[in-house]
């Protein structure tokens, strides 16, 4: 099999791994090498199926000793197999980079022989790029669950970002659909990475020549929908991962029934809108100090696909509103639907000089299209008239709510 045929097979096999994105790495060029990782991250283009196409995104091999029920590369699936050598991957990366096809490498792999053997080959690719070719560009690799901590550390000193995929959001789903994988084999390397990042981070404050350890941090990916789990199950797992392992991101990959299995029979492809709602909720937890329990409950365990999670939370907590923007705190402003960190900062800064009005907000280029239902501006309310929470949710989820009467439900405003 020639290199071109291998590339077609292994690039296509990598499309189901979504855990790569712009990084924030600041690896600089040194020793007159080739490339550097920008602090602003790598600029990416995305294909229709979600693949990031400015990186060389491939598998080292789609052979695998595991038989996970959801995976196209599972041991028992009848698919065309291929494998790259570390030397072939390093050579491809350098040739593609010199031709300006790519800005870095995202490398994952099926597990061959055992986790340590596979991890050794991944580390070998990074060593070839860094030491033989003096490549200083962006490298993102997926660590292998169950690999030794020594190999995890070696990889962390060579690459910019590492993914250690949690695979499924609950232990029950993992035991059912991927029984050969153990949760401890996944969380163990995550914990090792977190600890090493702390140690090397502290050392770099004291010693200028301390090497960088994963300057772009670690991420993970979970498949959603394969285990019939609720959205609450998913975001509670994400919340724990952020708290316990200092992750940069959790990526959500909707289940696609690409292989037949009795255990996933009857489960349809996960709607893209469900993925979108989970990403919105994830952003609220990372950037807006929301907790999983704020967004969903056991009674309402799934997101409403017709309305975004922040608006849904605000409607369910309508008794906290309307907020007067001239007195509300920064974090209260950020919880208003349609407002974010940028708008909140503009409001806080501008109101130091005068009381704000709707004309002031227009001058500040702040849209109140969604926020108007949850704020007063110098005592004026311009939101929708509604009788209860369900009616407001219906009005806000309508394609065009501009024809509804703009009157207040609140006394005295």
Image (cartoon, rainbow, N blue to C red):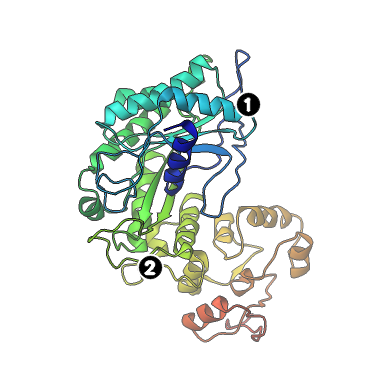
Whole-Å distance between the Cαs marked 2 and 1? 47 Å
Say which of 39 and 391 sits in front.
Answer: 39
Q: Is residue 331 visible?
A: yes
Q: Which residue is mark 2?
A: 302
The correct choice, above or below, for 123 with respect to 223 in the image is above
Residue 138 versus residue 19 in the image, above or below: above
Tags 2 and 1 in contact by the CB under 8 Å rule?
Answer: no
Count neighbours of disc 1 (C-alpha within 10 A) and say few if under 14, some if 14 to 19, many if 20 or more. few
**Residue 153's spot in the image, x, y percent?**
36, 24
Residue at point 62%, 40% (across, down): 43
Residue 144 vs residue 41, the one in the foreground: 144
Left or right relative to 300: residue 249: right
Report helix, strand or loop for mark 1. Answer: helix
The N terminus lies in which quarter of the figure? top left
370 displayed left or right of 192:
right
- Residue 183 is tagged as none
Quadrant location of the C terminus in the rendered image: bottom right
Circle 2: element type = loop
Badge 2 or badge 1: first in the primary sequence: 1
Closest to the observer: 277 or 261?
Answer: 261
The spot of residue 227 in percent (x, y) is: 28, 59
Q: Which residue is mark 1?
A: 98
Reply above or below: 178 against 335. Answer: above
Horizontally, residue 25 falls left or right of residue 155, namely right
Q: Is residue 157 visible?
A: no
In the rendering, at what x and y percent does residue 407 appear? 64, 84
- What residue appears at the point 25 percent right and 42 percent down from the top-left corner? 66
Q: Nearer the viewer, mark 2 or mark 1?
A: 1
Q: Within 10 angstroms of label 2, few (less than 14), some, or many (20 or more) residues? A: some
């Amino acid at each position: 099999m020639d290199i071109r045929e291998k590339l077609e097979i292994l690039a296509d096999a990598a499309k189901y791994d979504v855990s790569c994105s712009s990084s924030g790495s600041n690896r600089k060029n040194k020793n007159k090498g080739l490339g550097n990782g920008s602090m602003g991250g790598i600029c990416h283009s995305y294909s229709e199926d979600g693949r990031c196409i400015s990186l060389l995104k491939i598998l080292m091999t789609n052979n695998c000793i595991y038989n996970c029920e959801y995976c196209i590369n599972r041991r028992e699936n009848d698919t065309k197999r291929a494998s790259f050598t570390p030397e072939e991957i390093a050579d491809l990366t350098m040739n593609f980079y010199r031709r300006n096809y790519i800005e870095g490498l995202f490398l994952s792999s099926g597990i061959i022989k055992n986790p340590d053997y596979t991890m050794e080959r991944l580390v070998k690719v990074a060593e070839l790029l860094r030491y033989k070719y003096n490549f200083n560009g962006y490298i993102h690799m997926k660590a292998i669950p169950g690999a030794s901590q020594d190999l995890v550390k070696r990889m962390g000193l060579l690459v910019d970002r590492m993914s250690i995929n949690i695979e499924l959001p609950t232990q029950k789903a993992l035991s059912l659909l991927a029984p050969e994988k153990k949760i401890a084999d996944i969380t163990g390397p995550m914990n090792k990475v977190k600890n090493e990042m702390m140690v090397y981070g502290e050392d770099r404050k004291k010693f200028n020549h301390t090497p960088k350890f994963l300057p772009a941090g670690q991420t993970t990916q979970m498949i959603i929908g394969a285990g019939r789990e609720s959205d609450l199950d998913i975001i509670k797992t994400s919340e724990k991962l952020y708290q316990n392992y200092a992750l940069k991101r959790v990526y959500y990959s909707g289940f696609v029934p690409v292989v037949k299995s009795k255990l996933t029979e009857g489960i349809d492809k996960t709607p893209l809108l469900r993925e979108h709602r989970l990403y919105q909720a994830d952003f609220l937890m990372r950037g807006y100090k929301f907790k999983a329990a704020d967004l969903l409950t056991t009674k309402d365990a799934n997101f409403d696909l017709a309305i975004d999670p922040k608006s849904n939370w605000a409607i369910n907590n309508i008794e906290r509103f309307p907020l007067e923007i001239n007195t509300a705190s920064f974090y209260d402003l950020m919880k208003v639907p349609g407002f974010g960190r940028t708008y909140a900062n503009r409001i806080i800064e501008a109101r130091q000089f005068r009381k704000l009005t709707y004309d002031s907000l227009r001058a500040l280029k702040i849209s109140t299209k969604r926020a108007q239902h949850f704020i007063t501006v110098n005592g004026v309310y311009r939101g929708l008239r509604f009788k209860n929470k369900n009616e407001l949710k219906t009005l806000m989820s309508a394609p065009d709510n501009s024809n509804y009467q703009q009157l207040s439900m609140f006394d005295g405003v």
